[in-house]
Amino acid sequence: MTENLQPRAMRMRNDQIALQLYTVREPAAADLPGTIRAVAEAGYTAVELAGLPPTEPAYLAELLDDAGLRVAAAHESLESLRADASRVIDRLASLGCPRIVVPSMPRPDRATPDDVRRTAGDLASIATTAGARGLRLAYHNHDFEFESLDGTSVWDVLLDALPPAVEIELDVYWAAYAGRDPVALIRGLGSRVRLLHMKDLDADRRDAPPGEGTLPFPEIVQAGRDAGVEWYVVEQDEPRDPFPDVTRALRYLEQLADAQPAGAGPG
């Protein structure tokens, strides 16, 4: 399906843990400056953009800079990128964002294997446009990618059709929800997976903070380390209590980072 390219193992560092701001979209809608400050006060040093109210890029950049938060990536719909990729890239470049993530694939773009291949071609073209500005492009999965499609799956067709320039942000919750082993997927993707969405799967199949469900996060982190993952992004689609949830998630992942073998790192 795809060549397994394995880089040298990189230890997960605390400053590689980011928060997907979609998780705090409700408090952000009520008080964006206060929400940005609260994210930093929880201990995060980086964020992934999504779910924010309409905001001028210069103002958002000021809020993030004042809070000491870097932008790890930003989710942008495939539709918006098809409509005007240059405009999206200009806006994200002004925020110092190094990577665009396409968060999903509209149903018409995945109805048949040929539709998926055409979508992969669009992603490749967008990656070229972004690359000319110094930004990278990644694709984020849900569960539908792993459903059967004419004897194969959206996932397999997509990975076969995408060039290496299009990276993968693997959402471990959605992969497990679809019945796939996230550890095996990370190991199979190798250096193609650059980001992980870190949310747990609880006994009722709802998403939960890492460490509070059924997924093997020590093994997930180890596989990510072996693959050279750059960002471990905390996310909850439906948080019970956003700030306590994301704070516990960060503390748990920091504990996993601290528990890694002392010799685990570049070199």
Image (tube, rainbow, N blue to C red):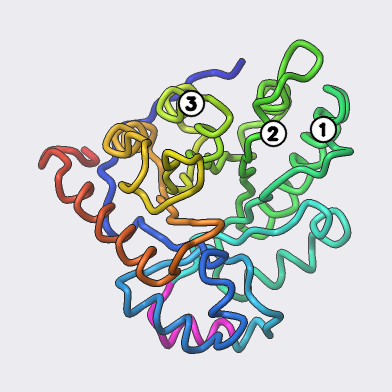
161, above or below 67, in the image: above
In what quadrant of the picture does the C terminus appear?
Answer: top left
Query: Is residue 73 magenta-colored?
Result: no
Q: What residue type is disc 3 on?
A: Leu
67 inside magenta stretch: yes
Q: Position of residue 6 (x, y in %)?
A: 40, 25
Query: Residues under labels 1 and 2: Cα distance?
Result: 9 Å
Element under label 2? helix
Magenta stretch: give its range. 60-69
Q: Position of residue 227 (x, y in %)?
A: 39, 33
Q: Decide which of tag 2 and tag 3 comes sooner along the chain.
A: 2
Residue in front for this viewpoint, 199 or 73: 199
Q: CA distance from mark 1 to mark 3?
A: 20 Å
Secondary structure of the residue carrying tag 3 is helix
Please report whichever mark, 1 or 2, sits nearer to the chain's N-terminal start. 1
Distance, label 2 to label 3, CA atoms, is: 15 Å
